[in-house]
Image (cartoon, rainbow, N blue to C red):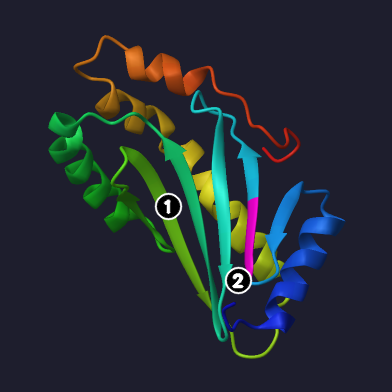
């Protein structure tokens, strides 16, 4: 069991419930899990909301089946993208996944708009850069990993696009 802000988690839970998100919540660790349908060919993103005492962080992951030899090109592209965006950053996961991480410091209780924006920004940015991500990810693979990404369906929901 880990210490986390029950107040922050309550506001997030209330928002997710009122906005009709399908989600799971790990009460012992203060972690929410959901899936967000994307408008792009990537299909969906797996979203984890990790609540702490004075902040929460959101991880939005897309599994790309990224080959090791493509990591240098992908890293260069993500560095350029990270310089363009204001909130959060993209990073490569150890398992060939792409992850967007966004940390929201909180003093007190976050307002509904802050929660809304923090939950919608990750999927918006992944969608916004999806074609560029796919073009680098699939450059040397005749589209095989693109096809794996494009045909996945969100396991939990389709409303959130």
Name the residue carrying label 1.
Answer: 100
Which residue appears at 28% of the width and 21% of the height? 138
Badge 1 marks a residue whose secondary structure is: strand
Which is nearer the eye, 2 or 51?
2
Mark 2 surroundings: few (<14), some (14-19) or many (≥20) residues within 10 A? some
1 or 2: tag closer to the N-terminus: 2
Magenta span has 92? no
The image shows residue 11 at horizontal and vertical percentages of 76, 73
Q: Indicate the quadrant containing the N terminus: top left, top right, bottom left or bottom right.
A: bottom right
Mark count? 2
- Rendered position, 102 above or below 67: below
On residue 29, the disc is 2
Q: Is residue 1 left or right of residue 15?
A: left
On residue 88, the disc is none
Residue at the outermost top position:
142
Magenta stretch, residue numbers: 29-33
Q: Are marks 1 and 2 in contact (CB under 8 Å)?
A: no
Q: Is residue 63 left or right of residue 136?
A: right
Badge 2 marks a residue whose secondary structure is: loop
The image shows residue 69 at horizontal and vertical percentages of 13, 30
Which is nearer the eye, 3 or 102?
3
Which residue appears at 82% of the width and 66% of the height? 14
Which residue appears at 69% of the width and 78% of the height? 8
Whole-angstrom CA distance, mark 1 to mark 2, is: 21 Å
The image shows residue 152 at horizontal and vertical percentages of 55, 23
- Main SS of residues in magenta: strand
């Amino acid at each position: 069991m880990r210490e986390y802000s029950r107040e922050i988690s309550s506001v997030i839970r209330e928002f997710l419930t009122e906005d009709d998100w399908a989600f799971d919540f790990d009460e012992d660790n203060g972690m929410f899990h959901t899936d967000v349908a994307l408008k792009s060919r990537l299909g969906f993103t797996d979203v984890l909301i990790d609540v702490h005492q004075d902040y929460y962080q959101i991880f939005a992951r897309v599994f790309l089946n990224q080959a090791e030899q493509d990591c240098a090109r992908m890293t260069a592209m993500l560095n350029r993208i990270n310089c363009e965006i204001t909130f959060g950053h993209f990073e490569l996961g150890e398992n060939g996944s792409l992850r967007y991480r966004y940390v929201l410091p909180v003093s007190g209780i976050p307002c509904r708009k802050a929660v809304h924006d923090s939950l919608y920004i990750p999927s918006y940015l992944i969608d916004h850069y999806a074609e560029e991500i796919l073009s680098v990810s699939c450059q040397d693979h005749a589209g095989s990993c693109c096809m794996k990404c494009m045909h996945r369906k969100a396991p939990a929901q389709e409303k959130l696009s």
